[in-house]
Amino acid sequence: MTMTYEEARAALAAKTLAEQDLARLGTCPPWRHAAFAALETALVISPLASINGRFAILAVLFVGIFLIIRSDRRRLGVFINGYRRGRTRLVVVPMLLAILALYSLSTLAAFDWHMPWVSLLCTAATFPTCYFGSMLWQNVFRRELGL
């Protein structure tokens, strides 16, 4: 099958239009960034809870993830995975490492060092890290798709 110059140009224009539509869909309201940050914050504070409390927090996290995915699909018609290829990984990987470090520090502080105030400091740092990281991810995603 041979494609003419005009067909190739039309296909590239259609691809660009589809990417711009996806970029517009990728614009989340502030509550969506806050919901993600709240879930991560709950994870970081979980070592301070009793064992039953930690299981309850994990259950709430799974329900929260499900609700966010369902909300995105209803609102946008699609759920855009944060761990996708491209420049967004340059945001996701450092943010993931920061969250893992905060969670690990919180866990050590709660279980080994018996210093709950360190866990609280980690928790206080988690929400803004995740909120602004989520907003940064969205901006990189939109720029990557040409919007």
Image (cartoon, rainbow, N blue to C red):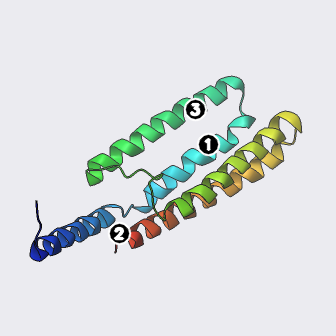
> How many numbered tags mark residues here?
3
**Which residue type does callout 3 highlight?**
Leu
Q: Amino acid at mark 2?
A: Leu
Q: Which residue is mark 1?
A: 42
**3D distance between C-alphas at marks 2 and 1:** 32 Å
Identify the secondary structure beneath mark 1.
helix
Determine which quarter of the picture holds residue 23: bottom left
Left or right: 47, with 31 as reference point = right
Query: Marks 1 and 2: in contact by CB < 8 Å?
Result: no
Q: Position of residue 99 (x, y in %)?
A: 66, 51
Q: Earlier in the sequence, mark 2 or mark 1?
A: 1
Per the image, the residue denoted by label 3 is 58
What residue sits 19% from the left and 73% below the top? 13
Q: Gap in Å between the C-alphas at discs 3 and 1?
A: 9 Å
Task: Residue at 49%, 34% (x, y): give it.
Answer: 62
Q: Earlier in the sequence, mark 3 or mark 1?
A: 1
Which kind of residue does numbered mark 1 sit on? Ala
Q: Is residue 79 above or below residue 7?
A: above
Q: Residue at x 51, y 67 (%)?
A: 136
Residue 59 lies, in percent from the top left, at: 53, 29
**Residue drawn at (61%, 26%) of the image:** 55
**Quadrant (top left, top right, bottom left, bottom right) of the N terminus:** bottom left
Decide: marks 3, 1 in contact (CB < 8 A)? Answer: no
Q: Is residue 60 left or right of residue 127?
A: left
CA gap, disc 3 and disc 2: 34 Å
**Badge number at residue 145:** 2
